[in-house]
Amino acid sequence: MTDPRWQTLPETTRIRWIRVLDDYNPIALTPLSRIALRTLATQGNADGLARLVAYALGWHDWGFAPDDWWMLMSAHLGHAHRATQSGVVNAPVALAPEDWARWPELVRELSPLEALAQLSASADSPEGKISGVGNGN
């Protein structure tokens, strides 16, 4: 069952969350599930996506709008639209929102890569919890 809080978000925000989660999926999905997600994302429909809804609400609760999350994923992974590139596997992306709570504020003032660099350089950096940030990977 989908979290009832999902219905409290504006419809455009719910649709946007489903669409950005289609680009950088946090949950390992089978090819058939990915096709279903893509169809649902196109329609803006979250029925049957309880795990993704819970994931989106977790980031929302930390102050992230869908596009804030998408920019973080894009900056973290090094380039945008990885999921739509031919021949590229859309592997799950596992980041914890509490580790990136300053991101929405920083990205409003800095470019996404500058915000990522600033977070990676800070004393409470999430860098140690993820691979590839700040080390050229």
Image: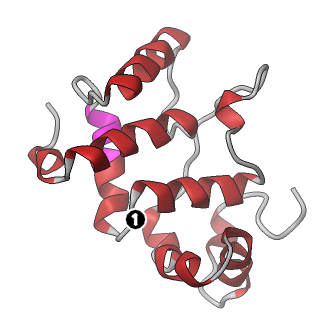
- Name the residue rendered at 44%, 37% in the picture: 19
The stretch drawn in magenta includes residue 4: no
Q: Measuring from the top left, give residue 61's x and y in whole percent.
A: 28, 65
Q: Measuring from the top left, give residue 65's x and y in whole percent.
A: 39, 61
Query: Please, which colouring scheme is shown?
Result: secondary structure
Q: Is residue 40 above or below residue 121?
A: above
Looking at the rendering, the stretch of residues picked out in magenta corresponds to 50-55
Tag 1, which secondary structure? loop
Q: 59 or 10, which lies in front? A: 10
The stretch drawn in magenta includes residue 54: yes
Q: Quadrant of residue 87?
A: top right
The quarter of the picture where the N terminus appears is: top left
Q: 74 or 43, which lies in front? A: 43
Q: Is residue 119 above or below residue 130?
A: below
Q: Quadrant of residue 81?
A: top right
Q: In terms of secondary structure, what is the magenta stretch mainly? A: helix
Residue 66 left/right relative to 26 = left
- Residue corresponding to mark 1: 64
Residue 59 left/right relative to 87 = left
Q: Is residue 92 above or below residue 75?
A: above
Q: Is residue 120 above or below residue 31?
A: below
The quarter of the picture where the C terminus appears is: bottom right
Residue 38 left/right relative to 9 = right
- Name the residue rendered at 42%, 22% in the picture: 37
- Name the residue rendered at 12%, 53% in the picture: 8
